[in-house]
């Protein structure tokens, strides 16, 4: 297992366990991984060695005679300014002891028998986090440790609230030159606002004003103002640097999350849209239909749902392949979208099933007109890769509140009516349970039935 060093210093681990066999196994594993290992047989030895040596990690058994692991951890936390992180080891599924350990300040625990691969990665993560914390706390007096190559924006403040370091990434994001920043009060540069507001007056370092509260701040999303007046979304952290009991400055770390937001928006779009046609999908429709029904109820109107199943689509896939079939579906989506008003919507439920939600009409005549237009439009030949494809459509119409009282029933009734249209010979529409209002659309001359 590869280890790492911090400014050339090998990580040092204190191993505390009253079981000599366990200590031997752990010592061999850790030393083989390149760590410097010191042992302690009990909690009292552990406290003495922690007080007189610097460790990057303490690995300690929870259950020990005398003073147990959580008690040692608690004493370290209350008597040391910056105690090393503690990883507890337990042979019991003892929830109370684990809770005590975390309350005392332990950062993690691992059970016996030990899974070495898990332990390896826990140690790497804990020591890495601990040394990063030490690095950040030393920035004010040793800020050359800040890597100029860091992708995140990093800014150091002194105790006078003025900028004493800023890295190239921060300068690029904010649009300033370094000469404009050094020695300048932070509040003149770091103008923040909450999302969806234009009040760039949020103080990112309130602990300078309130000495009783020196906790770090973290905004998953905040807006930062650039020098040119534009703004961008950022993940923003503000951490006070405390030396002894005095506030010595602060470290600001931020990252432009524009790409992250765009990726999240893309994920949301993909979750609600069909990847082939880009139409809203079944997931979207199941959320949209109840909303439309609620709005219809409020205004005492009728709502029409057209359930569409393509006729003669399977032979296209069988004859020309699914690639041609996919392009036919894309053209169907385009045609259906082109004929609707902006207040109406069309979704692809899956396969060759589509549904139209009519919110622009309140009459049977309007719904019947759209159903007829749908059939006529889909009867027109579709040319794909030098192939002329002929399809049609069977349409089932359901109506809220006439035949449906909820979204699930409305969709099911539309599906039933569509199958009634199939039985009637296809290429027609049928109103649920009112077959007398069915309509047949004549084919164009030359259409392949």
Image: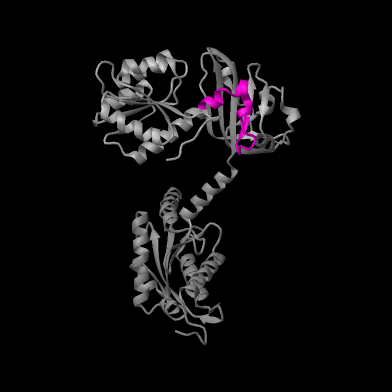
The percent coordinates of residue 413 (x first, y second) are 34, 63
Q: Let me know if residue 143 is in the magenta part.
A: yes
Report how many numbered discs are placed on residues in the image: 0
Residues in magenta? 133-154
Q: Quadrant of the C terminus?
A: bottom left
In this view, 31 is above or below 443: above
Along the viewing direction, whichever of 351 and 378 lies nearer the viewer: 351
Q: Quadrant of the N terminus?
A: top left
**Residue 215 vs residue 416: left or right?**
right
Along the viewing direction, whichever of 268 and 55 lies nearer the viewer: 55
Q: Residue furthest right?
A: 179
The percent coordinates of residue 376 (x first, y second) are 51, 75
Colouring scheme applied when the structure was drawn: one colour
**Residue 133 vs residue 64: left or right?**
right
Please report the residue visible at 56 percent of the width from the left and 81 percent of the height from the top.
Answer: 386
Quarter occupied by residue 29? top left
Along the viewing direction, whichever of 241 and 197 lies nearer the viewer: 241
**Residue 292 vs residue 237: left or right?**
left
In this view, 262 is above or below 82: below
Q: Is residue 396 visible?
A: yes
The percent coordinates of residue 232 (x first, y second) are 63, 39
Q: Is residue 204 visible?
A: no
The percent coordinates of residue 137 (x first, y second) are 55, 23
Q: Residue furthest bottom?
A: 446
Q: Let me know if residue 145 is in the magenta part.
A: yes
In this view, 281 is above or below 123: below
């Amino acid at each position: 297992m590869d280890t790492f060093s911090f400014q050339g210093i090998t990580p040092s681990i204190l191993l505390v366990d009253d079981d000599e066999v366990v200590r031997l196994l752990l010592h061999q594993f850790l030393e083989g991984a390149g760590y410097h290992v010191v042992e302690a047989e009990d909690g009292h030895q552990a406290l003495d060695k922690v007080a007189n040596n610097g460790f990057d990690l303490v690995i300690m058994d929870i259950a020990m005679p005398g003073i147990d692991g959580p008690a040692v951890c608690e004493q370290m936390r209350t008597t040391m300014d910056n105690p090393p992180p503690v990883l507890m080891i337990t042979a019991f599924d003892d929830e109370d002891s684990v809770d005590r350990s975390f309350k005392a300040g332990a950062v993690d625990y691992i059970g016996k028998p030990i899974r070495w691969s898990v332990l390896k990665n826990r140690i790497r993560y804990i020591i890495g986090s601990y040394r990063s914390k030490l690095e950040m706390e030393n920035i004010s007096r040793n800020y050359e440790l800040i890597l100029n190559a860091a992708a995140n924006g990093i800014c150091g403040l002194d105790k006078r609230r003025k900028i004493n370091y800023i890295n190239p990434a921060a300068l690029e994001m904010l649009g300033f030159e370094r000469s404009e920043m050094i020695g300048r009060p932070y509040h003149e540069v770091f103008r923040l606002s909450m999302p969806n507001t234009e009040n760039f007056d949020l103080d990112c370092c309130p602990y300078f004003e309130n000495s009783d509260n020196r906790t770090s701040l973290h905004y998953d999303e905040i807006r930062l103002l650039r020098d040119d007046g534009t703004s961008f979304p950022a993940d923003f952290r503000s951490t006070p640097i405390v030396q002894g009991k005095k506030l010595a400055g602060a470290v600001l770390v931020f990252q432009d999350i524009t790409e992250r937001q765009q990726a999240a928006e893309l994920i949301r779009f993909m979750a609600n849209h069909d990847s082939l046609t880009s139409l809203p999908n079944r997931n979207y429709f199941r959320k949209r239909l109840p909303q439309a029904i609620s709005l219809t109820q409020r205004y005492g109107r009728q709502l029409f749902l057209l359930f569409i199943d393509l006729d003669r689509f399977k032979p296209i896939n069988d004859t020309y392949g699914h690639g041609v079939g996919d392009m036919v579906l894309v053209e169907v989506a385009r045609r259906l979208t082109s004929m609707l008003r902006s207040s109406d919507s069309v979704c692809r439920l899956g396969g060759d099933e589509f549904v139209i939600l009519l919110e622009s009409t309140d009459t049977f005549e309007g719904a019947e007109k759209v159903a007829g237009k749908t059939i006529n439009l889909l009867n027109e030949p579709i040319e794909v890769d030098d192939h002329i494809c002929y399809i049609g459509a069977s349409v089932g119409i359901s109506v809220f509140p006439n035949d449906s009282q909820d979204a699930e029933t409305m969709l099911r009734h539309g599906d039933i009516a569509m199958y009634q249209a199939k039985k009637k010979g296809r290429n027609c529409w049928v109103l649920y349970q009112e077959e007398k209002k069915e309509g047949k659309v004549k084919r164009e001359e030359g259409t392949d039935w």
